[in-house]
Image (cartoon, coloured by chain):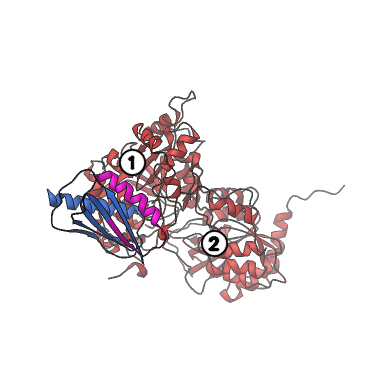
Chain colours: A red, B blue
């Protein structure tokens, strides 16, 4: 009887490293030999993780991989957080890869849709970040991971700097399952500020010809905020944050959230809410949060990534942010999204479309965009067992009149104007996601946040509290009641809406005591990027594209 | 450019001032609203010039609600619209009317 071997993966790893020795015997690989090295390390059909999120990107390694010989390396199954770079798309155009499991594809969404239609990309599934990370340890473990760090020392230790992001998760899944880890860094130095990834988890390092790409994804210029966004932010602060005493929260990216952040030191302060709301955050370092931090609203912020230009400010506020002994920030997307799911009481975000069940989606017909973290953050945490007054109040509203064991509820708020630019209605009878599913053969319509997870819908017309609705008809009517002059909104029954208003399910600005005459840009704590710099005492250094002075 | 006209019959004969009120600016996504006291046999007449074609029904719905909210008469309203959303239109109309009524009292 043949003896079963239990270390075939480790043996395969040794074979690959042996082949690679023909290209480079040192762990530090010259940049010009990287493509040749990858051709030895990677085998056809491999599962390969290419690091990159909305912020930092292993862009040099992505270009090297896109240049390998497709006669030798083909049918790769890519697993990666984000499809964002032209090189990511080239992998499929050149036949190097044919399958992908991912989370988000914002900038490449339109090209993705074309390649799927042409049969060049097979999508395994579109995930949330946490879900994809989870699968790295279950059934999508990478054989080779191409990662990115700020710098390395000569032993091979890595320093990620503030943008630690996904690196620890990817390396852990790969290095401890006989995989191979290749890192690109901006520079190799004698002494690192701190060690973020230990050397014995990394096989090869290369100094990339250019510093890696870093995208300032979370910077919103206050100069672009509209009065409608300010009005909606006032309603959120008075009608939700104050009423539920929301102290642990996450804000999605976007102008609506930025408006709320910029009203904390002005409008919220005038309502006497300092110290009573918005103390603990799971959030990328939004520049628009600076005034609230400086005004003493914010006690702590834990971040999935960093933000370009915020490094010095974050370093100078170690009581607020999570910083290393070297003084610079450490972020971690996996921990951060776990924190956002289980340890916050509120998520607020925006969407492109919402239907009458409250399902929301950012998919439009010609673009495959994905989810990122929104479904984790914008979902009630069914496994949560610790209480807070916010969570209990929301739970009481959701359960009133029902006989069930007591449990709380997370507040999941969608905030959006009823029409987007070019008069595209936000509220629709049927999400484009359904047609996307039919066209691409997906198992499910790509719904970002399911309606039964949403507690409140906020528009310029007011707030609909879906927790208080008892039937599907009531929920639909509550959504119509804040859907403005969209076809969905025009389909409302005025009597039903007035009834919901009497019961506090729909609340207009005047019901909340929100004076729309105050909704002007004068209410913003900062009206420009320059004023944010001023609030930061000159520590915030905005990227050039945001400087107009 | 599309030109639309709407008329509403008000019951109250609210006294406006002789001065005109102007709020907003004509720019992309924004609009200008001008209110003038005018002898219109109790009518409120609204003229809309808009850069967005084909939204007559939405204008009708927005202005129906506006007229019902304030019960206006003898008022000429001129709107120059640069493709504002209904949310912005409602906000500007409310601002214009509040300014107008303040100036009247």
Q: In the image, which residues are magenta?
A: B46-73
Q: Which mark is residue A241?
A: 1
Task: Give the mark nearest the N terminus, 2 or 1.
Answer: 2
Which residue is denoted by mark 2 in the rendering? A109
- Tell whether A345 sits left or right of A33: left
Q: Quadrant of residue A345?
A: top left
- Residue A509 picture location, percent across and down: 30, 43
Residue A526: mark in rendering: none
Q: Chain of mark 2?
A: A
Question: Looking at the image, do the residues carrying marks 2 and 1 touch, with CB atoms under 8 Å apart?
Answer: no
- Count of picture labels: 2
Measured as percent of width and height from the top left, residue B83 is found at: 36, 62
Depth check, mark 2 against mark 1: the one in front is 2
Q: Is residue A164 left or right of residue A241?
A: right
Q: Is residue A424 above or below residue A359?
A: below
* Residue B68 forms part of the magenta stretch: yes
């Amino acid at each position: 009887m043949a003896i079963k071997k239990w270390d075939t993966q480790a043996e395969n790893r040794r074979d690959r490293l042996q082949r690679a020795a023909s290209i480079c015997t040192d762990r530090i690989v010259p940049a010009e030999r990287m493509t040749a090295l990858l051709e030895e390390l990677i085998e056809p059909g491999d599962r390969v993780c290419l690091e990159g999120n909305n912020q930092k990107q292993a862009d040099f390694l992505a270009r090297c991989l896109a240049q390998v010989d497709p006669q030798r390396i083909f049918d790769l199954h890519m697993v990666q957080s984000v499809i964002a770079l032209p090189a990511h798309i080239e992998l499929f155009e050149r036949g190097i890869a044919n399958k992908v499991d991912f989370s988000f594809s914002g900038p490449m969404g339109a090209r993705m849709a074309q390649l799927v239609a042409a049969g060049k990309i097979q999508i395994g599934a579109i995930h949330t970040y946490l879900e994809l990370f989870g699968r790295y340890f279950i059934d999508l473990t990478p054989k080779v991971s191409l990662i990115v760090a700020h710098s390395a020392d000569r032993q091979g230790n890595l320093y990620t700097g503030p943008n630690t992001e996904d690196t620890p998760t990817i390396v852990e899944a790969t290095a401890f399952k006989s995989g191979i880890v290749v890192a690109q860094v901006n520079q190799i130095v004698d002494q690192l500020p701190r060690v973020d990834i230990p050397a014995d988890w990394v096989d090869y390092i290369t100094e990339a010809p250019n510093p890696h790409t870093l995208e300032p994804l979370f910077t919103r210029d206050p100069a672009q905020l509209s009065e409608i966004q300010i009005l909606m932010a006032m309603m959120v602060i008075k009608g939700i944050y104050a009423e539920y005493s929301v102290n642990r929260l996450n804000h999605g990216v976007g102008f609506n959230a930025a408006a709320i952040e910029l009203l904390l030191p002005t409008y919220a302060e005038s309502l006497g809410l300092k110290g009573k709301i918005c103390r603990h955050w799971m959030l990328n370092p939004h520049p628009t949060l600076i005034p609230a931090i400086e005004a003493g609203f914010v006690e702590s912020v834990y971040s999935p990534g960093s933000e370009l230009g915020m490094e010095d400010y974050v370093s100078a506020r170690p009581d607020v942010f999570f910083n290393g002994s070297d003084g610079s920030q450490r972020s971690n997307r996996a921990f951060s999204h776990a924190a956002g799911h289980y340890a916050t009481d509120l998520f607020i975000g925006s969407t492109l479309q919402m239907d009458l069940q409250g399902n929301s989606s950012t998919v439009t017909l010609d673009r495959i965009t994905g989810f990122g973290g929104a479904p984790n953050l914008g979902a009630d945490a069914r496994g949560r067992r610790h209480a807070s007054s916010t969570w209990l109040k929301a739970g009481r509203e959701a359960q009133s009149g029902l006989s069930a064991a007591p449990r709380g509820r997370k507040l999941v708020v969608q905030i959006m104007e009823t029409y987007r630019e070019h008069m595209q209605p936000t509220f629709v009878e049927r999400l484009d996601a359904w047609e996307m599913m039919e066209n691409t053969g997906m198992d499910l319509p790509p719904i970002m946040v399911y309606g039964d997870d949403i507690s409140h819908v906020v528009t310029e017309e007011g707030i609909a509290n879906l927790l208080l609705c008892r039937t599907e008809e009531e929920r639909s009517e509550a959504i119509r009641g804040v859907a403005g002059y969209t076809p969905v909104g025009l389909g409302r029954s005025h009597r039903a809406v007035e009834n919901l208003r009497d019961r506090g399910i729909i609340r207009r600005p005047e019901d909340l005591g929100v004076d729309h005459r105050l909704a002007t840009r004068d209410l913003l704590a900062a009206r420009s990027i320059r004023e944010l710099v001023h609030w930061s005492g000159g520590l915030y250094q905005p990227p050039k594209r945001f400087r107009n002075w | 450019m599309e030109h639309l006209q709407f008329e509403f019959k008000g019951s109250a004969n609210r006294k406006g001032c002789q001065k005109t009120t102007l709020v907003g600016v004509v720019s992309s996504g924004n609009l200008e609203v001008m209110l003038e006291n005018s002898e219109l046999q109790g009518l409120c007449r609204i003229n809309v010039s808009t850069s967005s074609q084909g939204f007559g029904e939405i204008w009708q719905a927005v202005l129906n609600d506006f007229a019902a909210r304030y019960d206006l008469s003898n008022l000429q309203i001129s709107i120059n619209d640069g493709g504002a959303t209904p949310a912005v239109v409602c906000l500007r109309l409310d601002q214009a009317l509040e300014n107008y009524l303040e100036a009247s009292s």
